[in-house]
Image (tube, grey):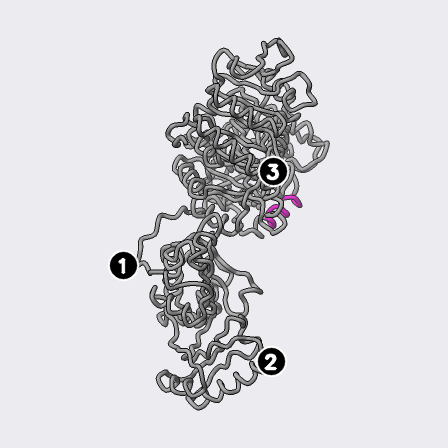
Amino acid sequence: MNKASDFTPISELLAPRSVAVIGASEDLTKFGGRLFKLLVQHGYAGDIYPINRKRESLLGIKTYASIDLTPTPPDMAVMAVPRDAVKEAVLACAKAGTKAAIIITAKFSDAGEEGAALEAEIVEIARAHGMRLIGPNCLGIISPASSLTLCASPALFVDKLPKGRIGMVSQSGALMATIFDRAQTRGVGFSHCFSIGNQADMQLHDFMDFLVDDADTDVICTYIEGVKDAEGFLASARRARAAGKPVLAVKSGRTAFGAAAAFSHTASLAGNYEAFAAACRETGILLLEDTDAMILQATCMSRFALPKRSDVAVITTSGGGGAITADRLSDLGVPMALFSDATVKSLGLLFDGPATSANPIDMGAAKVGGSVAVAEDSIKALLQDDNVGFVLAPITTAPDVRLICESIVNGAESVKSPNGQKPWLIVVQPGQAGDAARAMLRERGITYSDSLDEAIRVVEGYRDYAALKPMDAPERPAGLKVRDTSDLSGALGEDAAKAVLAEYGVPVNRGAVAQTADEAHELATEFDAPFVIKVVSPDIIHKSDVGGVVLNLQTADDVAQAVTDMAAKLSRDLPKAHIAGYLVQEMRCAPLEMFVGANNDAQFGPMVMVGAGGVLIELLKDVAVARAPVSVDHARAMIQGLAVAPLLDGWRGSGPLDVDALAEAVSRVSWMVADLGPRFQELDANPVLVGRKGEGCVAVDARLLMANPDEEGESR
């Protein structure tokens, strides 16, 4: 088996000097026919070798009966053949010296165990000969920057493929083609688009790395169903951030139904969406909800400089439309720009009275000439204002929509900046009355939107991208040793789980397990009142629901009586439950209950969580998630992003709580779960009581789940 260093560099694989089309024909009802036709039609400059046993030529190009008969080994082969013929085709390409092959054919790991076995076999064949594979179950490559079209989508039967500076990697071929088609109807182009399917060999991060290094690409878009190599993916994202290339992602599988569909589609393990989102935040990837929003965002990012501030100026043809836009922005917490004195002075030449400083600007209120007369100078003034980060221009139905839009474009393009122009976006809101304006904008290569909602999401996307702060690797706390996990197995109850937490410096309340009422009485004499009693049973999860918790006991006699009563009740109500004892603890109280937990994500490893705790955890679902381990500063940022953060800061004069202590506890839990290794599965410390500032916090309940030693690695 060849090592990675033995293969041809990705940059050469994806810029082939020659291409063989296995299954080429002139029948446009077939994949091979459409793909071959499009490769020729869009002007690929390299050598084309159509492989067809029955024809001497296709579209005037000489054919070859097999790939070993081509004049030179093709750099790239693309095969659109039945599944049962793929193995033979891969072997023939590998033996011929082909560097890479695209497998369009589906029904491999996306279709069950038999297909998965065949997929593994063809990958092994390819790697043994130093050949790379793209797919299977993909739609190939669309590369306007290289005039390379190795895709059979009917959307590509156009005179010319628009070029742009957006690169795209998609696990869905049909979705890639749909995105490309919708984008080109707006005049939006791409540098390269890759459909990667099952990622049997070349994976998502391989193509991302290519785009990071590609001189024709400024922004990277991804549609992701599952990540096979999490570390490779995150490393590529960090490289992109360092190179100043934004990475945008749409991830399917946010819900149980979506995850199931993703698995059946490209055999990807969808994983936990929150874990994926956390990984994106920590590496600077902007995560979006749909592909239309992603492409519009990418188009703006490829055209404009990143804004230095989020304040928005609105210029519009409708007072009502401007008010709605301002309301929508305010709902999202996006600030409306306050104009500088210079801008107010400039606007004073165009408008009367309050309109000179009003935001939104209603161009219909111009002194003379209406919107057309003032559009150009208005947007020039706004783009030159340092208080403005983004200009939004929602245009409503008017007799001269095209002229208004053209004036805005002329004004905006006249404003030059050495660091790149700040973003501005026209929203063409009319239906057919705006078609002439849309045609003009496409002809001039200007990004526009048809929807106010879509445009506002771009504004929000810029703000969210600016807020992304990639995290450096945390420094291990001084003196914190890695714990030996050999003694940890299965479900650990509260006492054992809290003992591990305590080893990592997480504060816990004192307690011990008693088997009888007399033992409980003796333990209580060693602790400080008041006391709490909790049943210890692997069969009872929600102890308080069945009378397995008694609070606020004042004396050792009270403790003994509580154990006696609890034992009788549980024996009567839950006769089959195994009772392992009764936990006697010092009872602690604090103003706020929080939750600190962790799990082991199948793709991204141990994840630490913090959120609203106690009985509110399932009701509020207010939880922040991050990859473990995290620094104290990172943990504090997670806490401050919660909906309950105002309570920690001292809501309505209640006084601040000890956020620093909670952040320290979250960080130490993160180191703990990172150290526990692949057998770690889940941790639940709930509640963690947070005291007033300077009083600290304490975990008063916890559970820890570890896989058994013979299940090493299965939890991940």
Q: Disc 2 marks which residue?
A: 573
Query: Counting residues from the N terminus, which is met first, the one under dot 2 or under dot 1?
Result: 1
Pick the residue in front: 462 or 172: 172
Q: Find the distance from the CA under tag 2 to the CA under tag 1.
A: 49 Å
- Figure check: 265 above or below 154: below
Residue at coordinates 46% horizontally, 89% vertically from top-left? 558
Give, as a single range, the part of the protein colored magenta.
Answer: 319-328
Residue at coordinates 62% horizontally, 9% vertically from top-left? 56
Q: Specify few, some or many for label 3: CA neighbours under 10 Å numbering under 14, 14-19, or 20 or more.
A: some
Q: Nearer the viewer, mark 3 or mark 1?
A: 1
Query: SS class of the residue under badge 3?
Result: helix
**Quadrant of the rendered structure where residue 410 is?**
top right
Using the rendered image of the protein, determine whether residue 350 is visible from the camera's viewpoint. no
The residue most toward the bottom is 557
- The percent coordinates of residue 387 (x first, y second) are 46, 43
Query: Counting residues from the N terminus, which is met first, the one under dot 3 or under dot 2?
Result: 3
- Figure check: 390 above or below 47: below
The residue most toward the left is 479
Q: Disc 3 marks which residue?
A: 292
Using the rendered image of the protein, determine whether residue 603 is visible from the camera's viewpoint. yes
The amino acid beneath tag 2 is Asp
Query: SS class of the residue under badge 2?
Result: helix
The amino acid beneath tag 3 is Asp
The amino acid beneath tag 1 is Ala
Q: Is residue 323 magenta?
A: yes
Tag 2 near tag 1, CB within 8 Å: no
Q: Find the distance from the CA under tag 3 to the CA under tag 1.
A: 48 Å
Residue at coordinates 53% horizontally, 43% vertically from top-left? 226
- Figure check: 341 above or below 661: above
Query: Counting residues from the N terminus, which is met first, the one under dot 3 or under dot 1?
Result: 3
